[in-house]
Amino acid sequence: MRNLVRHNIEASCIDCNASKPGFKTVYGKAYLCPNPDTHSAEWEQFMIELAKSIGRKPVLLAIAGLSFVTAYPALLWLTAAPTFGKMLAVELMFSLYFGVYSGTMLGALVEIVPAHVRTTCFSLAFALAAALFGTFTPFSATTLIAMTGDRASPGFWLMCAAASGFIAAMVIYRSGAVEAREAAVAAQA
């Protein structure tokens, strides 16, 4: 790793830091970020700040894309020979996806929803997502396993959610959409 940094190749590595709650890289630039398991509010704020620095669209598309391509393979790997370590790895991966996506989406919703209806719109978006993908998940997972005989098939349900998130990010950030909304709000004021 040191050779990479010495040759100006940026590399990232996450190591646990026992002296502080969170993680930091020990190679190259040091970034401190909160531990998503114990400091979820700080984790979301960290992801909002990260998305501000590189843009919300790339973060949303990257996480939705990663979720789409890794959901089924991760569950297939887990169900092939289940162990606690595999389960922990898959859960941490999904937890990372959820934390990054939800933290970034909070900032995206602030950008696209007018202030006077922001709370209502966020509540509606969160409730619909929880109702469609959260409460229906046990039924869909059971049905998919029964229909296919594949214990990893609930990954297809997560792939549907990821595809929905990818499409939503593309629609929200289509060329000029955010700027047009901001101009319309400014014209009304």
Image (tube, rainbow, N blue to C red):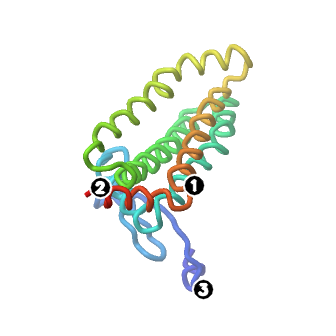
Q: Amino acid at mark 2?
A: Gln
Label located before the other in sequence (3 or 2): 3
Residue at 25% from the left image edge and 58% from the top image edge:
189
The quadrant the N terminus occupies is: bottom right
Which element carries disc 2, helix, strand or loop? helix
Label 3, secondary structure: give it.
loop
Position of 83 compared to 103: left or right? right
Classify residue 80 as left or right of residue 97: right
Q: Position of residue 188 (x, y in %)?
A: 29, 55
Residue type pointed to by label 1? Ala
First in sequence: mark 3 or mark 1? 3
Which residue position holds label 3?
7
Q: Residue furthest right?
A: 148
Expressed as whole percent of the image width and height from the top left, the position of residue 55 reads: 47, 64
Where is 152 relative to 55, above or below? above
State which tag comes first along the sequence, 1 or 2: 1
Q: Position of residue 87 (x, y in %)?
A: 55, 35
Q: Quadrant of residue 164?
A: top right
Report whether residue 125 is seen: yes
| Three-letter code for the amino acid on which mark 3 is drawn | His
Q: Looking at the image, how many numbered discs can be counted on the residues?
A: 3
Question: Along the horizontal axis of the image, is 164 left or right of 43?
Answer: right
Residue under the image location 53 percent in, 23 percent down: 137
Residue ID for mark 2: 188
Label 1 sits on residue:
62
Residue 89: quadrant of the picture: top right
Q: Is residue 113 above or below residue 182?
A: above
